[in-house]
Amino acid sequence: MLKYIVSVFFILSIFSSNCGNKKEPCAIFFPLKSDVRLNFISYVTNQQNEMIHPFEYFERRYIYTDTIGTRLIHHYLEQNKLSAFYTDDSCTIRHRIRVDLSALAINCGFVYQDSVYLTFWKPVIKVNDGVNTKWHSQVDTNFSVKTPDGAEHVLRYEFSGSAQYKGWTEVVVPKNRAEKLKVRQVDWNPSKSFLYDQSAEDTLFVQDGNTSDYFEPQLGLVRSTSDYEVVWKDKPKAFRKSTWELYSVLSLPQE
């Protein structure tokens, strides 16, 4: 009798384990349709919910796909800038991030003649381990700048973040005010970037906070919200809340 009970318990344990690790379908980042335009609205507020940056509207549209090795890289246009993403064999989506380091340096009082960018592939959603899948992203680089009097300084930029796939939820975006969209949620907590002057051993800029991203099965990333603190050298700490979300979808006639 004891042997029978143990056997039943073992079978139920396997069944429960398999149910708990149910395979998630792959998410999408953006629809690969040349006749579709996704329009978004974005804005930034402070701790008092006052508008810091007014409403901005921007469009995303798919351009083309090319191949690097066996990997399909999908390119899209946003605000006249080309960006890209790809999905690997484990359904992880990686988005190409481009950080304007020279702009950060100029804001800190340095002189920079030529633009310099840091480009890296950031994993934006992973579902291979089901709900509560976790991952980490980190990148850093050093670059040289000059002060107005010609002295050379070496600056270090770093981004790091820890993310977790939270599963399915519902959100409301301007496109669908009358109904909620069923989406998958990814939380980045924390998400931090900083700029450090290695020559002067001085911190110039820190942005530290958390972000939530929402992926709809057919439209991809439809909403992103961030709460963060920004500190520039010799300036008071500032709290910011940024939001961008899907405003409308346009289907253009086929040529």
Image (cartoon, helix red, strand yellow):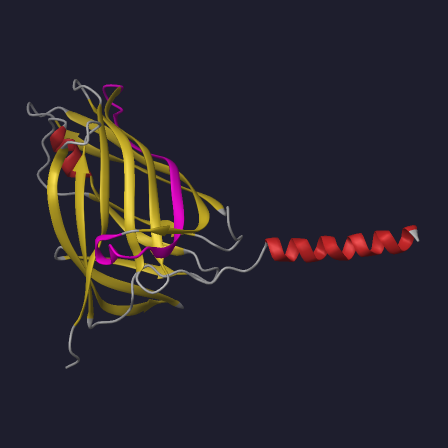
Q: Position of residue 91 (x, y in %)?
A: 45, 60
Residue sitting at the far left: 149
Q: Which residues are magenta?
A: 173-201
Q: x and y percent of residue 40 in the render?
A: 19, 54
Residue 196 x/y as whole percent? 26, 26
Q: Please say whether residue 235 is visible from this viewpoint.
A: yes
Residue 69 seen in render: no
Q: Residue at x 21, y 44 (%)?
A: 117
Residue 202 shown left or right of residue 146 in the figure: right
* Horizontal side of residue 154 vs 56, given as left or right: right
Q: Looking at this view, is 145 or 160 the one in front?
A: 160
64 above or below 153?
below
Q: Is residue 73 above or below residue 134?
A: below
Residue at (22, 62) in percent of width and height:
76
**In the picture, residue 217 is in which quadrant?**
bottom left
Of all residues, the one furthest to the bottom in this rendering is 255
Q: Quadrant of residue 82?
A: bottom left
Indicate whether residue 40 is drawn in magenta: no
Quadrant assignment for the C terminus:
bottom left
Would you place residue 189 above or below residue 25 in this image? above
The answer to which of 96 and 143 lies nearer the viewer is 96
Quick check: is 178 in the magenta stretch?
Answer: yes
Q: Please indicate whether residue 66 sits to the left or right of residue 26 in the image.
A: left
Residue located farthest toward the right when viewing the structure as drawn: 1
Residue visible at 14% across and 54% down? Answer: 58
Residue 148 lies in quadrant: top left
What is the count of numbered marks?
Answer: 0
